[in-house]
Amino acid sequence: MSQRMIEITSPVFVPETELRKHADPRQLFGDDRPLALEIGCGIGDFIVQLAEEQPGTNFLAIDIYNKGCHKTCRRIDSAGLKNVRVLRLEARYLLSRYLCRESLAAVYINCPDPWPKKRHRSRRLVNREFLQLLLHYLRPDGNLYFSTDFDDYAHEVAALLPTLEGFDNCLDEPFSHRLPGYPRSKYMRRFLDRGQPIHFIHYRKSGDFPAEAAPLPSIDRGFRVHWSRAQNG
């Protein structure tokens, strides 16, 4: 049974029809502040904390689930925040269709679907192709934050990033269980309360790395975007 679609009337929610009217999503805010992206905003706990702590930055918060977008909008409206816009879009679709090259000051990816079964791990969002895609849209010295409660996912991403030219590790280790000052979402707090660690990764795009130096993967059409079979080999 499919879930009932919730109508989202919040002023911070941006339907794709509205997004198409703008050549650059930064125009949604009416100013020239730095733009950051949270991929998978869930119920909005993390983005509200982050936007409150960084009022000088504008944030796009995206999720593929209608219910999550609705809850995120409610939290943003309740907090009275003006520097967040919520979109129901898949990350690769948003990046390839609507964002301008080197337009993001930071990307935040917190506890994405780990697809724990080995036969499903090709479905994980953060892989080589996706990281190469981010190199096009992060500005020089732009930050990439990744967190996961799955040990093998953390090791996978931590082993992959050093093999990609254009990213520099901001930590003294491949990943850390502590990242001072980083907001903790409700999901993170639940696992930490159970004694289960969160793995944090923080990389930065090299200041002298040109966006065009990374190969740009091709992307199939569709709302739930999948990498083309040719790219997956």
Image (tube, grey):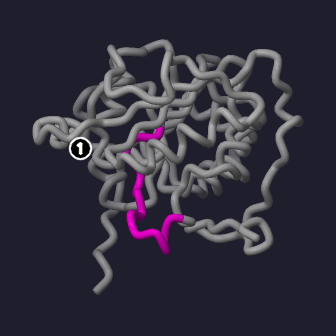
Tell me the quarter of the picture where residue 224 sits.
Answer: bottom right
Secondary structure found at label 1:
helix
In the drawing, does residue 213 fall left or right of residue 145?
right
Tell me the quarter of the picture where residue 100 sits.
Answer: top right
Question: How many other residues sit within 10 Å of disc 1, few (<14), some (14-19) or many (≥20)?
Answer: some
In the drawing, does residue 110 fall left or right of residue 216?
left
**Residue located 58% across and 25% down the image:** 203
**Residue located 26% across and 43% down the image:** 74
Let me know if residue 82 appears in the view. Answer: yes
Q: Is residue 24 above or below residue 128?
A: above
Give the residue number, with chain letter if any, for mark 1. 187
Q: Is residue 126 above or below residue 3?
A: above
The magenta stretch spans which residues?
A: 109-121
**Percent position (x, y) of residue 41?**
38, 44
Please identify the residue farthest to the bottom as the structure is shown: 1
Tell whether position 118 is magenta: yes
Tell me the quarter of the picture where residue 154 sits.
Answer: top left
Quadrant position of the N terminus in the picture: bottom left
In the drawing, does residue 145 fall left or right of residue 163?
left
**Percent position (x, y) of residue 200?**
40, 31
**Percent position (x, y) of residue 78?**
22, 33
Residue nearer the viewer, 229 or 137:
229
Tell whether position 132 is magenta: no
Residue nearer the viewer, 69 or 7:
69
**Percent position (x, y) of residue 134?**
68, 39
